[in-house]
Image (cartoon, grey):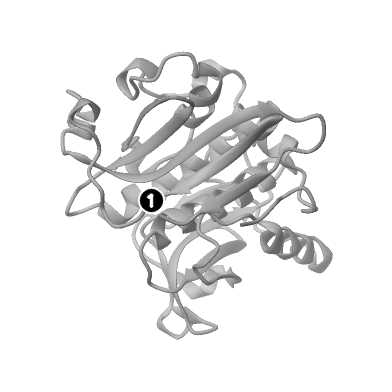
């Protein structure tokens, strides 16, 4: 169990960033100062995990130590490392998206890097394995979208059968995803929203990361409303209900459940959350 009222990371700017963030692919060559990078790493330590029992670590990586297809050249990269454990991909996406939104809220550009990896000597950190990274720095293009119409996302009705929770799911719908495939589907009843990710042999890990990103947006939307939230964390490849099947080729395979979120009464004070093991 864990409460987040004592965390120093302010979640409201992260929530507001959901509706204007974009992937920045053009960066100024000059890097951030030492104090700014220290602040970034301090905020990374405050990021809230989806599964607290999974050990993770963040590391700053320079451009010279990053190689791979579709690399976006930037002065800095924020890599997340994790122990290999059920749910670790979704957990990594959940954590790193908080940093993506934090950087956007501070006027800095960032871009998820699904293909590039650190050079061989940097693929382990503190006994943990590299998962994925963000490119970031001072943008050489607009950091934010000019309007909501710039988001290219499928309609909410194609990714959920849940009614009455559009205020939450609208934020999840705007989450970035690997190759823009939006591999999630939302079901639920009796105050619970379940998040499912499409199973795919070639992009299974990325789909799990993307589902973690969507879960991050759901959590922030709940905190914005001042609700009390309970995460009923699900691991082990459970299959989603048959109704979660979708005609879209992007979600043509049977999804597997990643996690479930339950909401309750509003709070007069700071919102809180808790993880209940499966």
> On the image, which quarter does residue 155 sit in?
top left
Q: Residues within 10 Å of mark 1 (few under 14, many from 20)?
A: many
Q: Is residue 22 above or below residue 6?
A: above
Residue 24 in view here: no
Q: Nearer the viewer, residue 185 or 17?
A: 185
Q: Nearer the viewer, residue 27 or 149?
A: 149
In the image, taking residue 243 as reference, residue 116 lies left or right, namely: right
In the image, taking residue 133 as reference, residue 243 lies left or right, namely: left
Specify the quadrant that holds the N terminus. Answer: bottom right
Relative image position of residue 213 (x, y in whole percent): 48, 44
Q: Is residue 231 above or below residue 235?
A: above
For the residue labelled by badge 1, is the local secondary structure a helix, a strand or a loop?
A: loop
Residue positioned 49% across, 29% down in the render: 174
Residue positioned 51% across, 50% down in the render: 94
Relative image position of residue 184 (x, y in whole percent): 34, 36
Residue positioned 19% across, 54% down in the render: 202
Relative image position of residue 168 (x, y in whole percent): 54, 25
Q: Is residue 132 above or below residue 210?
A: below
Residue positioned 55% across, 52% down in the render: 275
Q: Nearer the viewer, residue 35 or 212?
A: 212
Residue 125 in view here: yes
Relative image position of residue 65 (x, y in whole percent): 50, 75
Residue holding disc 1? 234
């Amino acid at each position: 169990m864990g409460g987040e009222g004592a965390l120093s990371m302010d979640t409201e700017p992260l929530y507001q960033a959901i509706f204007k963030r974009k992937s920045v692919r053009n960066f100024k060559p000059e890097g951030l100062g030492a104090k700014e990078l220290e602040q970034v790493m301090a905020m990374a330590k405050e990021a809230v995990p989806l599964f607290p029992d999974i050990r993770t670590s963040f590391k700053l990586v320079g451009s010279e130590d990053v190689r791979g297809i579709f690399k976006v050249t930037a002065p800095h990269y924020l890599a997340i490392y994790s122990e290999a454990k059920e749910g670790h991909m979704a957990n990594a996406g959940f954590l790193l998206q908080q940093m993506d939104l934090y950087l956007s809220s501070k006027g800095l550009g960032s871009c998820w890097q699904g293909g590039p990896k650190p050079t061989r000597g940097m693929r382990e950190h503190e006994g943990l394995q590299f998962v994925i990274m963000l490119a970031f720095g001072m943008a050489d293009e607009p950091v934010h979208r000019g309007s909501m119409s710039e988001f290219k996302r499928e309609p909410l009705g194609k990714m959920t059968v849940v009614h009455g929770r559009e205020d939450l799911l609208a934020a999840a719908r705007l989450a970035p995803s690997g190759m823009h495939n939006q591999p999630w589907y939302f079901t639920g009843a009796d105050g619970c929203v379940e998040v499912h990710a499409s199973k795919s042999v070639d992009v299974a890990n990325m789909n799990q990361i993307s589902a973690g990103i969507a879960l991050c947006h759901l959590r922030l939307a709940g905190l914005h409303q001042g609700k009390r939230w309970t995460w009923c964390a699900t691991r082990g490849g459970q299959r989603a209900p048959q109704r979660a099947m979708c005609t879209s080729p992007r979600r043509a395979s049977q999804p597997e459940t990643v996690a479930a979120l339950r909401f309750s009464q509003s709070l007069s004070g700071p919102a809180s959350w808790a993880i209940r093991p499966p």
